[in-house]
Amino acid sequence: MQSTSSSRPAGAQGPVEVRRSARRRRTVTAYRQDGRTVVLIPASFSRSEERTWVDRMVAKLETRERRGRRTLGSDEELMVRARTLSEAYLDGVLPASVRWVDNQNRRWGSCTPADRTIRLSSRLRTMPDYVVDYVLVHELAHLLQPAHDAAFWALVERYPRAERALGYLEGVEAAQPG
């Protein structure tokens, strides 16, 4: 397999490495690896075809990555989500604030009922929406019932995907080393 470097097209993250293969006939593949974009093309491609396909594949990777990004980016968006969930499942109880935090490595979220603040671990940003929603409902329920007693869990179970989300989080925790 022959490897060449290419100029960096728009959307490329880091350098682009083009790998030509005599075994590859028609297919073109691209992926991210170690801070660069790798594009695999047939050795028979001309330089013009190479440029066209590199641009196309980098754009395709960028589109795929953009689709995978969470829409709950800001604390304000998180607060809107909390209000929506609260109205749907917890009779409209409202926190004073909801925000992402980077310092929660053992918990998914926390709530301080005294000042009505909720914090969610930024580790949740990569997880499915229903999991983030579950953690929000869990923390919102603490505004009504501070302890993890039967009344609290009855509130949390109003969220229809609670059991599934809890299973997801348990799986993530089980897969982590240590």
Image (cartoon, rainbow, N blue to C red):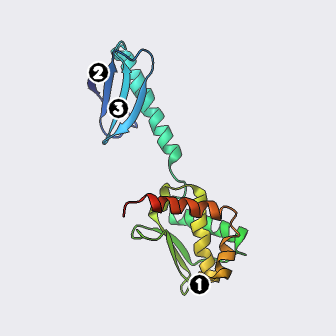
Where, quadrant-wise, is the N terminus in this rendering?
top left
Q: Which residue is mark 1?
A: 146
In screen coordinates, is 83 left or right of 108? right
Where 66 sits versus 118, above or below? above
Assess whether mark 1 and mark 2 are in contact (beta carbons under 8 angstroms). no
> Where 56 falls versus 13 (above or below)?
above
The kind of residue tagged 2 is: Met
Q: Is 54 positioned to the left or the right of 124 in the image?
A: left
Q: Earlier in the sequence, mark 2 or mark 1?
A: 2
Instruction: Tell me the quarter of the picture where residue 86 sits.
Output: bottom right
Q: Residues within 10 Å of mark 1 (few under 14, many from 20)?
A: some
Based on the displayed image, in which of its 4 quarters is residue 18 positioned?
top left
Say left or right for 135 vs 13.
right
- Amino acid under label 3? Val
Q: CA distance from mark 3 to mark 2?
A: 13 Å
Which quarter shows the C terminus? bottom left
Residue at 65 percent across and 76 percent down: it is: 153
Q: Amino acid at mark 1?
A: Pro
Q: Which residue has dot 3 on it? A: 38
Q: CA distance from mark 2 to mark 1?
A: 61 Å
Q: Nearer the viewer, mark 3 or mark 2?
A: 2
* First-in-chain label (3 vs 1): 3
- The residue carrying mark 2 is 1
Image coordinates of residue 91 in percent, x first then y, are: 73, 75
Q: Position of residue 121 (x, y in %)?
A: 46, 67
Could you tell me residue 50's position as x and y percent?
37, 20
